[in-house]
Amino acid sequence: MTATETKTQEARPGFKVMTLLEAITDAMRTEMRNDDRVVVFGEDVGKKGGVFGATLGLQDEFGEQRCFDTPLSECGIIGAGVGMALYGMRPIAEIQFLDFIYPAFDQIVSEAAKMRYRSGGEYTCPMVIRSPYGGGIRGGHYHSQSAEAYFCHTPGLKVVIPSTPADAKGLLIASIRDEDPVMFLEPKRIYRHGKGEVPLGEHVVPLGKGRIAREGKDVTILCYGAMVHVCEQAAEEAEKAGRSVEIVDLRTLVPLDEQIVLESVKKTGRAVVVYEAPKTCGYGAELSALIAEKCIEHLEGPVVRVAGFDTPFPYTLEPLYMPDVKRVLAGIEKTFVW
Amino acid sequence: MTSELVTIIEQDGKAQKGKDPALPAAELQRLYRLMVTTRVMDDRGLAMQRQGRIGFYLQSTGQEGSHLGAAYALKASDWLFPAYRQPGILLLRGIDPEQIVSEWIGNDGDTSKGRQMPVHYSFRQANFVSISSPIGTQLSQAAGAGMAARIRGDDTVFMTFCGDGGTSSNDFHCGLNFAAVYKAPVVFVVENNGWAISVPCSKQTASESMAIKAQAYGMPGVRVDGNDVLAVYRVCKEAVERARRGDGPTLVESVTYRMASHSSSDDAARYRDAKEYEAWKKKDPIARFQLYLQQKKLWTEQFETEVVEGAKAAIQDAVKKAEARSNPAVGTLFDDVYMNLTPQLKEQKAELLDLVQKGGVGADIGAFPL
Ligand SMILES: Cc1ncc(C[n+]2csc(CCOP(=O)(O)OP(=O)(O)O)c2C)c(N)n1
Ligand SMILES: [Mg+2]
């Protein structure tokens, strides 16, 4: 249980207590009711309701035309999604694990991302590609990767990563309504960890706006997804040792909310960037560069990256690979003592 | 021609006239023992997952005849590019069950050093290429290995497997296309077990069969009863010989059934009709082969007991030995990314070893949820 999760199972009127996973289903259900152009498809999303259960009940409610299983082809799933979007639908394509998205890379990077630009704005590709990502579930190489940097590096794609149930719903609805292709990456490690209050019905969290997950004054941690929760625990520990930690949950990696990042770092004078992906050329490298470019004069210590190691994702030694509380604390210390 | 289902063992256990491959008695009994041992091992794997002793397991129940019959047609020097549902081949190729169980645990006796999820084996000693999770990737690799063997003038044959779901992958197309264009010595075995997790084969393809797809690529396609180990063997033997002669690849569709759920994380009862399972249970490949052995007077109750108990004892012994082993050493996390550690990896390794020495590192990792 962390600061962003409610400790009670009772919700206020107009809210419901949900897991992050349930909030994602709720977002899709809400938009499918709102807009008959919204369709959901992918491997096992129909009768089974997805391997994690994210699409549970959607086929029952909306029928096989609007929620359907596809053949086992990520390339087909995304290519078909691009075609549907071109023809005026609002497709939500599920890729079972982000680790399996690579056969669709061409359709995402060369097609979805560039359609608007290359057609001079004549054709657009408003689609959402949803995919569980990240480690922490003992899934080995191919059920654990954090591949967000590839997509952040592709102009034309938006990249969104929620860390709480309420944000998951609000950001997904905003992504479905967005006029551009959105990679909506779901931190599967926290699909069912802890519940939170989620507004019923309409709930939109705008893309491009981060949030202060915790206020503090000595050091800023920049993070997203499951790492927000690890950082919250680390912040509690650091507080005991007299370090006041501010946590910025980015929520949207592209477009980035630069203002919230820079204001926080200017205030605290120190920054730690935490992400699960391999360290080299990860999203944290971009954040570090941004801070160096735009507010170096406010820094009182080095910008420190706490990240996955530059190895493929391991199986047995996974607990040592994932950034944990101890490593975040060590990172915080490095901004004070260097 | 491609839609006809090749069968040898009839309902009563007799071989169809003129089709019995007439293997020696000892070989038939060995094949039977391998099938039974594979099932015993699979049952044990699932039980260990349920007991929390390993993180994940995936059974091949009902497909023992299919993959064992296919691989039995190869020479030991031939190569395998497997998918993840052919564990019997490891036993056929003489892998010590302790090494298999070590892979499930991911300990220091695992050939892949605890880097992959359970059942993703790699056994170079058996010409068994490292298994990948991404569906289909092995198919084009098998084509390339076959092309290489042709360039080098070797007579090695390459057998590769995928499921019905795998036929929709990009690599199915390019693998078959390349193999056919370059006449690569490859046998593509599609184990059509009716399901790709919860997606039935009817939603995977609109073709009347998987075998018929071979026509479009310019290679022979054969449909064989995958629960008839002798039929699979016979069909694959012909395909292997054809490949070795230099006449190019063959697509074999082995029609079988996934009797278990997809994996330890799946519950097939949620999307599959129990009647379908019951119908296929009657076609169990082990029972079918047992009938054949009975007809040949190669099976007795006593033989059965000896086979089953022998298999259980062997697996039990393997589990005991494997569980006594340790985790791979922490530093191995950084090995094998490249031949040599890069300066960055050296630095990261030192940093982790230092933290480990100070204690308290190691995230609390949950269980694999699907
Ligand atoms: C490229 C890719 N997409 C999705 C998955 C997830 N997945 C694992 S097994 C599987 C179904 C495979 O079905 P099939 O090829 O018929 O093989 P079977 O499991 O029946 O042996 C899926 C979708 C994957 N491993 N790789
Ligand atoms: Mg299948």
Image: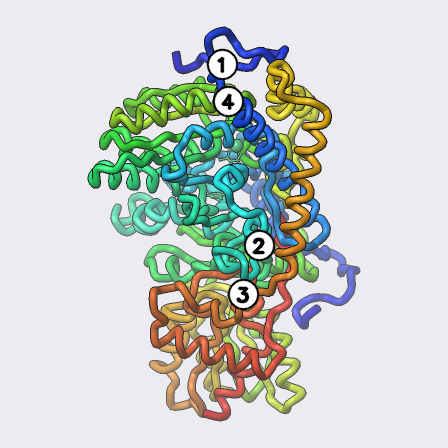
Q: Which circle's residue, 3 or 4, is located before the other in the chain?
A: 4
> Which residue carries the number 4 mark?
B24
> Which residue carries the number 1 mark?
B20
> Which residue carries the number 2 mark?
B102
Task: Tell which subunit mark 3 falls on.
Answer: B
Label 3's element? Answer: loop
Q: Nearer the viewer, mark 1 or mark 2?
A: 1
Amino acid type of the residue tagged 1 in the rendering: Asp
Q: In which quarter of the image is the N terminus of chain B?
A: top left
Task: Tell which subunit mark 2 falls on.
Answer: B
Q: Position of residue B202 (x, y in %)?
A: 51, 24
Are discs 1 and 2 less than 8 Å apart at CB? no
* Residue depicted at 38% across the width and 45% down the height: A104
* Residue depicted at 43% across the width and 59% down the height: A147
Vertical arrangement, residue B355 with respect to residue B8, above or below: below
Q: How far apart are marks 2 and 3 (CA)?
A: 11 Å
Q: How far apart are marks 4 and 2 (CA)?
A: 34 Å
Q: Distance between the residues labelled 3 and 4?
A: 43 Å
Vertical arrangement, residue A8 with respect to residue B314, above or below: below
Are discs 1 and 3 less than 8 Å apart at CB? no
Q: Distance between the residues labelled 1 and 3?
A: 48 Å
Is A264 left, or right, of B51 in this rendering?
left
Ligand 1 near label 1 (Cβ, under 8 Å)? no
Q: Position of residue B321 (x, y in %)?
A: 63, 56
Amino acid type of the residue tagged 4 in the rendering: Pro
Amino acid type of the residue tagged 2 in the rendering: Ser
The image quarter in which residue B365 lies: bottom right
* Residue depicted at 53% across the width and 87% down the height: A333
> Which residue carries the number 3 mark?
B328
